[in-house]
Image: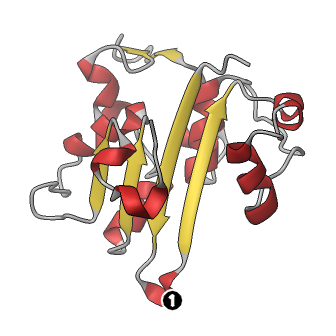
């Protein structure tokens, strides 16, 4: 098992104390899940969470279009992320899968807000780990990270969650 990416999005709603944890493992197929389900981490998700092996990927079957479809609820033709690498033929600018600063330009590439932006605007606590999209939030004009502390994103979950509440992330 060698997934190309592992992303975690945690949304905690204020109303009714509902919680959502979304874990996306790029490259982890349903067959891998069943093969490694004896591992305690995956077994907990299987026994106590909601999961599916029946998801049908959107076309094109690339990580970014599928991830953005999950996070926006829209198909690639609507949210605009139709590949990991894109060319805007009108402006000549390219999207290079989060490798250059212009990839985070909201006006160019990010036309529909994903779940974590909508949840943050609704005053829900949002924590994101290992998402390249985290950096895109800094570029939203009407969204200030300094004045709104309901968004947390960082490289290591252990930096935010007390060890007694989660065990060891290492």
| Residue 166 left/right relative to 135 | right
Placement of 20 over or under 144, stated as above or below:
below
- Label count reads 1
In terms of depth relative to the viewer, which is nearer, 95 or 19?
19
Question: Does any portion of residue 96 appear in the rendered image?
Answer: yes
For the N terminus, the image quarter is: top right
Taking the image as shown, residue 103 lies to the left or right of residue 62, namely left
Residue 88 placement (x, y as % from top left): 43, 18
Return the x and y of residue 87 as percentages of the image width and height. Answer: 46, 13
Q: x, y (%) of residue 70? A: 63, 47
Q: Position of residue 138 (x, y in %)?
A: 21, 43
Q: Is residue 167 above or below residue 59?
A: below
Identify whether 137 is placed above or below 48: above
Quadrant containing the C terminus is: top left
Using the image as rendered, state which of residue 137 and residue 29 is in the foreground. Answer: 29
Q: Answer few, some or many: residues within 10 Å of disc 1's Cα (few below 14, many 20 plus, some between 14 and 19).
A: few
Residue beneath disc 1: 16
The residue that appears at 36% across and 10% down in the rendered structure is 92
Residue 37 position by quadrant:
top right
* Residue at horizontal 77 percent and vertical 49 percent from the top: 43
Q: Report the coloring of the rendering.
A: secondary structure
What secondary structure is marked by label 1?
A: helix
> Where on the picture, by quarter, is residue 100?
top left
Residue 80 visible in this rendered orientation of the protein: no
| Residue at x 30%, y 30% (from the top left corner) | 104
156 w.r.t. 63: above or below: below
- Furthest toward the bottom, the residue is 16
Residue ID at (70%, 24%): 27
Looking at the image, the residue that sits furthest to the left is: 146
């Amino acid at each position: 098992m060698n997934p190309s990416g592992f992303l975690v999005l945690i949304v905690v709603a204020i109303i009714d104390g509902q919680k959502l944890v979304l874990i996306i493992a790029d490259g982890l197929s349903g067959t891998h899940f069943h093969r490694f389900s004896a591992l305690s981490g995956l077994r907990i998700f299987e026994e106590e969470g909601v999961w599916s092996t029946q998801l049908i990927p959107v076309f094109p079957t690339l990580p970014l279009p599928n991830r953005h479809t999950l996070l926006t609820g829209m198909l690639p033709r609507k949210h605009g992320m139709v590949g990991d690498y894109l060319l805007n033929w009108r402006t000549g600018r390219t999207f290079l899968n989060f490798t250059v600063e212009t990839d985070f330009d909201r006006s160019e590439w990010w036309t529909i807000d994903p779940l974590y932006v909508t949840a943050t605007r609704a005053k829900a606590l949002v924590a994101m780990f290992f998402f390249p999209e985290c950096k895109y939030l800094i570029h939203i004009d009407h969204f200030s990270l300094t004045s709104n502390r309901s968004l947390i994103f960082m490289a290591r979950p252990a930096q935010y969650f007390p060890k007694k509440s989660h065990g060891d992330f290492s």
